[in-house]
Image: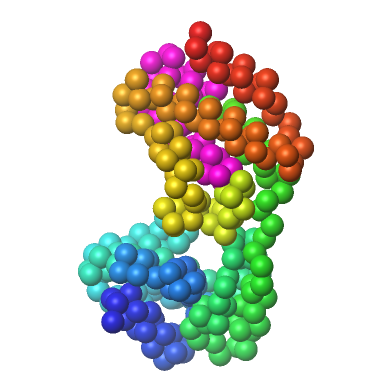
Amino acid sequence: MLKQKELIARVKQIAESDVRISACMMYGSFTKGEGDQYSDVEFYVFLKDDMVPTFDSAKWLHEVAPYSLLYQNEYGTEVVIFENLIRGEFHFLSEKDMNIIPSFKETGFFPDTKAMFIYDETGQLEQYLSGLGGVGPKRLTEANVNFLFNNFSNLWLMGLNVLKRGEYARSLELLSQFQKNILQLIRVVEENADNWLNMTKNLEKEISTESYEKFRKTTARLKESELYDAYKNSLLFVMELRNVVEQQYMLTVSNDFLEKLMRYMNE
């Protein structure tokens, strides 16, 4: 059995026996049939309202399994690295906050909501989870496509300016930011938007070999010549992608504008 599945079973066992817990659900790879030996385990644990002030999450997680690291990230999530080096993310919320679940619908596609269910004594969790089923949010919209072209153009120009100034590390940082827009544009063209928010997930399997090779040419090390090549290849690729999607969407960024950016790069 995978170590992750052993941890999942242990979380279920403890949640069912802990009188302080009202409900528990899982999300992530193991609820989508994608979990493997490299996957994280991710949970929402809903506590009885009067138990929240005295609940010790560190002690509770140690009952799940010994860990080597535990901290709260910038989103308020308890991030744990167990001694077997499996990562876990745990959200501990009050039972009254269970109504947050419907908002998950906007984050992606949930193919098997039953796999998300761990434990519930309230009778509410299954109903909330069932609402996440069906098709995911519509990503292939004119508004989204225009945002991607607009944001790419802004970040690309900012990055090129700092590259010309000699701020190579900053230009590399900005390169990584607009690469996200390129990946989402690829998914627009190839009509594969299930991993829209986490656009690198399964990228090697989900986009075409041709697109993957063109994206590879937008990457660079912290070296001036490679950065210039990556910026040039990024703009050329986006111009190509624009020529494809303009047949389907009304675009605010014109070819003339993108060509103007290219001329500026060559000055």
* Segment colored magenta: 157-186
Where residue 16 appears, as percent x and y from the top left, is 44, 90
Identified at 73% across, 39% down, the residue is 247
> In the figure, is residue 206 to the left or right of 251?
left
> In the figure, is residue 203 to the left or right of 197?
left
Q: Nearer the viewer, residue 262 or 80?
A: 262
Where residue 69 appears, as percent x and y from the top left, is 28, 62
In the rendered view, would you say 102 is above or below 13? above
Identified at 35% across, 25% down, the residue is 226
Q: Nearer the viewer, residue 22 or 123?
A: 123
Where residue 197 appears, as percent x and y from the top left, is 55, 53
Count of labels shown? 0
Q: In which quarter of the image is residue 1?
A: bottom left
Residue 92 visible from this viewpoint: no
Q: Does the magenta stretch include residue 119?
A: no
In the rendered view, would you say 238 is above or below 65? above
Q: Quadrant of residue 4?
A: bottom left
Specify the farthest residue to the right: 250
Identified at 37% across, 66% down, the residue is 40
Residue 253 visible from this viewpoint: yes
> In the figure, is residue 55 to the left or right of 182?
left
Specify the farthest residue to the front: 210
